[in-house]
Amino acid sequence: MQIGLAVGDVRGPAPWDVVVDQVQVAAAAGFATAWSSQALGWDALTAIGLAAAAVPDIAVGTAVVPVPQRHPMVLAAQALTVQAAVGARLTLGVGVGVGAMVSGMFGLPTDRPVQRMREYLTVLGPLLRGHSVDLRGDTLTAVGAVTLPAGVAAPAVLVAAMGPRMVRLAGELSDGAVTWMTGPKTLGEHIVPLITKAASAAQRPAPRIVAGLPVCVTDAPDDVRARIAEQFALAAQVPEYRATLDREGAAGPQDVAIVGTETRVTQGLTRLRDVGVTEFMAAPYGTAAEPRRTIELLADLNRRTGR
């Protein structure tokens, strides 16, 4: 299992130079990937592209960019621009977004999320590979192509997938799934087998499964979990995450976060690896001292496993 590091907004609002520094720290420590999430601050794709241009020795990815407010032809052009700028180091993670935000903030429809993502992926893949598309579907119209000079490789595409239909769709039409606030029981019993079976049926390679969680090495786990419960309270309320937390038997994000001593955190990562996670997206959590201790442990695990 590779270990990557979340950078930017998921770790809290940060000035631009701090975001670049986070990517530099990830590269210097030998992490596989620096992951940028789209929240309410920096644009995830632009941020990771600019930061990676300054830090050449690490793969980068989005986990994830919500697609309802970005037409696939627009997103394909943006992703290929970033891909060219970073020398083909990009993984593009996409998702349907949190319904309450998509409708409440943008006034966009949120019905039929799996159908919407199916039509989106149907054209996104060909667009990224330089092909023309002509789709006049139930939820999307896309006609045309992204015209760029030859030689820009299509980035891998991952889908934010937790429900069974979305997980199967990710296996059928993408390179894998990315999750957030999803624990090992749900990953091992639900997501990994479903996506693996769907990818095999579609004659696709074994899927990448990227699991993102807050992680904190600490001697005061109860205090840290209480802070996580407060900071990520929304995830315990919206249906998209509530269903996954219920499947895990978790009251909230604090129960799936990986928190504790070096030994406890190592055991948590080992459990993720054992259930079939291929890449762990670590979101270091806590005060200034806590993330440093966390990153030191994760970097040591990287060195010991040769990642």
Image (cartoon, rainbow, N blue to C red):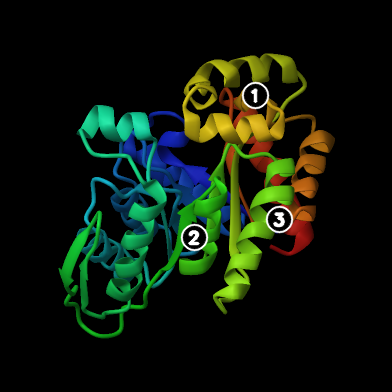
Tell which tag, 1 or 2, sits nearer the viewer. Answer: 2
Viewport quadrant of the C terminus:
bottom right
Q: Neighbour class for label 2 at 10 Å: few (<14), some, many (≥20)?
A: many
Residue occupying image coordinates x 73% and y 15%: 222
Q: Neighbour class for label 1 at 10 Å: few (<14), some, many (≥20)?
A: many
- Where residue 306 sits in the image (x, y, percent)? 74, 64
Tell which tag, 1 or 3, sits nearer the viewer. Answer: 1
Under mark 1, the amino acid is: Gln
Viewport quadrant of the N terminus:
bottom right
Q: Are marks 1 and 3 in contact (CB under 8 Å)?
A: no
Residue nearer the viewer, 214 or 34? 214
| Disc on res. 169 | 2
Q: How many marks?
A: 3
| Residue underneath mark 3 | 302
Q: Which of disc 3 and disc 1 is earlier in sequence? A: 1
Is 271 placed above or below 302 here?
A: above
Q: Is label 3 in a helix, a strand or a loop?
A: helix
Q: Is label 1 in a helix, a strand or a loop?
A: helix
| Disc on res. 254 | 1
Under mark 2, the amino acid is: Leu
Under mark 3, the amino acid is: Asn
Residue occupying image coordinates x 73% and y 25%: 218
Q: Residue furthest front?
A: 138
